[in-house]
Image: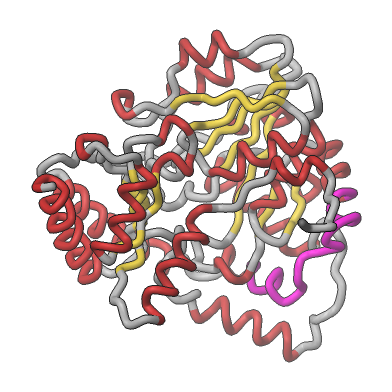
């Protein structure tokens, strides 16, 4: 028996299953197996060279020390400009807090706003850390079902019923992980109308909002009266293929920005200096690499969804953004976890079980098409062979 007596709240936190699956896939590869990795949400593109060069320049100039807790002023100005241009949100640098990665914005927002007795509504299926940190904050986690029959959009009538006097925060993720679904402008406007002027905040996770294949998503913070009720979560990992650089940011009203800066001061001190200088180049330098990456993702998406829908027993809604497919595999009589486990062990394809993204993800698997078209074709062949085997058994 372990002598470690950790606080009870530690039992409320859960890890990301994608990293667990990746570890298992890597272990199989170490034994000589060939695995197609579709489990992890990481662009397979190199960080653009101009961003790398900017980081090297910062290092060579000795920009290696502490920075202001809320981030360096030139980056916060650049982020505010980015928000005005791409999100149509009237932000200034005083609204911006820079953090090491996107997750701290989730963590800090919930620690700032939610506590025992409060309710937080979150997308389900959705990024699993939402529910984990809601529970850690002491608040009640209230799922917002995103159903296949509704193209993984919000059921506005149900959401309206679920909002009550205990609701403190609603989390939106647009485009969404794991489904690739998008909320329409009408959806966002309706949600804003439900909460405007009430003591309910929105955490708007917009980390994928430049990886889209149609109309630019509407940021709820851009709507009248909503900027002060919204915390925007965004970062550099997905758009600029900078997952390992660990740099994200939040945009919020000045009072909340002060509280978030205090949480940063008591935990991380500051984000790394050289990555912040590189991020300025990411935002203000050439943007052609983003367009090329999105075009490649669209080509892969179009192939993958068409190919999956040709497999007997699988059907998949066309995702509108991000780089995930969320095919329905419920016809095979396995749980999503069983299907994903066996697909890895028997089929050589690493995928995420839908239930790891919440109860409403049961019956689905998540496939990341942040992999080459060649590897996606191999994966589809293996999935097809695997499902034919299941049909025979």
Q: Over which residues does the magenta segment extend?
A: 262-280
Q: Is residue 269 magenta?
A: yes
Q: Where does the image place residue 70, in percent across and percent down from the top left?
A: 82, 56
Q: Where does the image place residue 143, in percent across and percent down from the top left?
A: 54, 25
- Residue 317 in view in this figure: no
Furthest-bottom residue in this view: 60
Q: Where does the image place residue 388, in percent across and percent down from the top left?
A: 11, 51
- Residue 248 in view in this figure: yes
Of 101 and 84, which appears nearest the observer? 101
- The structure residue drawn at horizontal position 86% and vertical position 60%, both measured from the top left corner, is 69
- The structure residue drawn at horizontal position 44% and vertical position 66%, both measured from the top left corner, is 24
- The structure residue drawn at horizontal position 76% and vertical position 18%, both measured from the top left corner, is 199
Position of 70 compared to 122: left or right?
right
Using the rendered view, name the quadrant where residue 350 is placed: bottom left
Q: Quadrant of the N terminus?
A: bottom right
Main SS, magenta residues: helix
- The structure residue drawn at horizontal position 65% and vertical position 80%, both measured from the top left corner, is 55
Position of 245 compared to 72: left or right?
left
Using the rendered view, name the quadrant where residue 149 is placed: top left
């Amino acid at each position: 028996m372990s002598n470690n007596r950790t606080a009870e709240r530690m039992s409320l936190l859960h890890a990301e299953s994608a990293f667990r699956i990746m570890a298992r896939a890597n272990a199989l590869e170490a034994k000589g197996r060939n695995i197609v990795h579709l489990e992890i949400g990481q662009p397979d593109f190199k960080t653009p060279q101009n961003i790398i060069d900017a980081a090297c320049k910062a290092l060579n100039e000795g920009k290696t020390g502490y920075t202001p807790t809320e981030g360096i002023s030139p980056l916060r100005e650049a982020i505010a400009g980015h928000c005005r241009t791409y999100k149509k949100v009237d932000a200034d640098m005083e609204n911006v807090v820079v953090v090491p990665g996107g997750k701290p914005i989730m963590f800090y927002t919930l620690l700032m706003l939610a506590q025992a007795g409060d309710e937080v509504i979150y997308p389900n299926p959705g990024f699993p850390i939402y529910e984990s940190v809601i529970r850690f904050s002491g608040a009640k986690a209230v799922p917002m079902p995103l159903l296949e029959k509704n193209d993984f959009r919000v059921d506005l009538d149900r959401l309206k019923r679920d909002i009550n006097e205990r609701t403190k925060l609603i989390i939106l993720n647009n485009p969404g992980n794991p489904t690739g679904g998008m909320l329409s402008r009408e959806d966002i406007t309706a949600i804003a109308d439900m909460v405007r002027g009430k003591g309910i905040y929105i955490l708007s996770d917009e980390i994928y909002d430049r990886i889209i294949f149609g109309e630019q998503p509407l940021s709820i913070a851009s709507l009248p009266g909503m900027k002060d009720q919204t915390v925007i979560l965004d970062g550099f990992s997905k758009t600029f293929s900078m997952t390992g650089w660990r740099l994200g940011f939040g945009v919020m009203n000045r009072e909340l920005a002060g509280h978030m800066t205090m949480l940063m001061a008591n935990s991380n001190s500051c984000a790394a200096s050289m990555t912040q200088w590189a991020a300025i180049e990411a935002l203000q330098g050439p943007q052609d690499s983003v367009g090329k990456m999105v075009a490649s993702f669209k080509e892969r998406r179009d192939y993958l969804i068409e190919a999956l829908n040709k497999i007997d027993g699988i059907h998949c809604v066309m995702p509108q953004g991000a780089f995930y497919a969320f095919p329905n595999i419920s016809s095979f009589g396995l749980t999503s976890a069983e299907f994903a486990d066996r697909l890895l062990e028997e089929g050589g394809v690493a995928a995420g079980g839908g239930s790891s993204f919440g109860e409403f993800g049961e019956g689905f698997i998540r496939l990341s098409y942040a992999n080459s078209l060649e590897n996606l074709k191999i994966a589809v062949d293996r999935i097809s062979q695997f499902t034919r085997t299941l049909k025979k058994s």
